[in-house]
Image (cartoon, grey):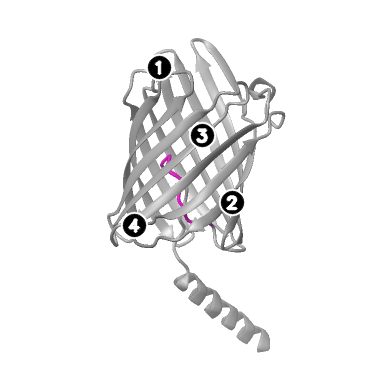
Amino acid sequence: MKTKISLFLLFISTTIFSQNQESIQTDRPDQTETATLVAKGMFQVETGFSVQKNDVNSTTQTLPSTLWKYGVNDHFELRLITEFTHEKLFNEKVSGFNPILIGCKIKIADQKGIVPKTSFIGHISLPNVASKEFKSEYFAPEFRFVMQHTLSKKVSLSYNLGAEWDGFSPEPTFIYTVATGYSITEKIGSYIELFGFAPQQQTANHNFDGGFTYLISSNFMVDASAGVGITENAPDHYWALGFSFRL
């Protein structure tokens, strides 16, 4: 009898906790990372598959790209990124794991008036923790400041600024993203986004994308997105599908 009562109380407490918990927030499917951190003690996985047509002769597939996150406390999140890619150039094909990235997200400020909710994300890639064909020569850092404004109950504005290195050259590539999110219903979300990459010694490329998310439960979400290149030197187009969950 005591065992049944204990199980019943555990079920009730778990249900109440789940009901009071905020819905999962993710860094995918857009290029704009969220300023929200994973809650303390929670483990979150965000994974997806994508196909990108770089040009008439080149295609890149990610099968999959996965972001692993753990909330250390209210101000600090640990992060790990693993990515398996398949590249095709003319008739040549190569597949393997890109260098693993390890990093963190640090909360800087909550939204207050015109001051956006702000966090800092930093990663570094490990050049030798990769498949032979995808190893880089050096450790490669990347970072970005992520900002977010909640404009209304349904509309948000987010933007990122940062830079990344490729592990071969000392020259950085600067990054910008701007995304507008709109909640169609309590479960269905949507976004449109402008983003680009500006290498130090080359012309910047700019892209446009959009997508949808569907919240199956407060801890599980699926997504779909697609984008096109705006400038001539940008990838032609891409599409992606993914899902995220937390424990």
- Label 1: element kind: strand
Residue 245 in the image: above or below residue 138: below
Q: Residues within 10 Å of mark 2 (few under 14, many from 20)?
A: many
- Label 4: element kind: loop
Q: Quadrant of residue 205?
A: top left
Q: Looking at the picture, how far across and down is residue 198, in whole percent?
A: 44, 26
Q: Gap in Å between the C-alphas at discs 2 and 3? A: 21 Å
Q: Residues within 10 Å of mark 3 (few under 14, many from 20)?
A: some
The three-letter code of the residue at mark 1 reads Asp
| Residue bearing the label numbered 1 | 55
| Residue bearing the label numbered 4 | 114
In the current view of this chain or complex, which residue is farthest to the bottom? 1
| Residue bearing the label numbered 3 | 163
Magenta run includes residue 29 = yes
Q: Quadrant of residue 231?
A: top left
Q: Which residues are magenta?
A: 28-37
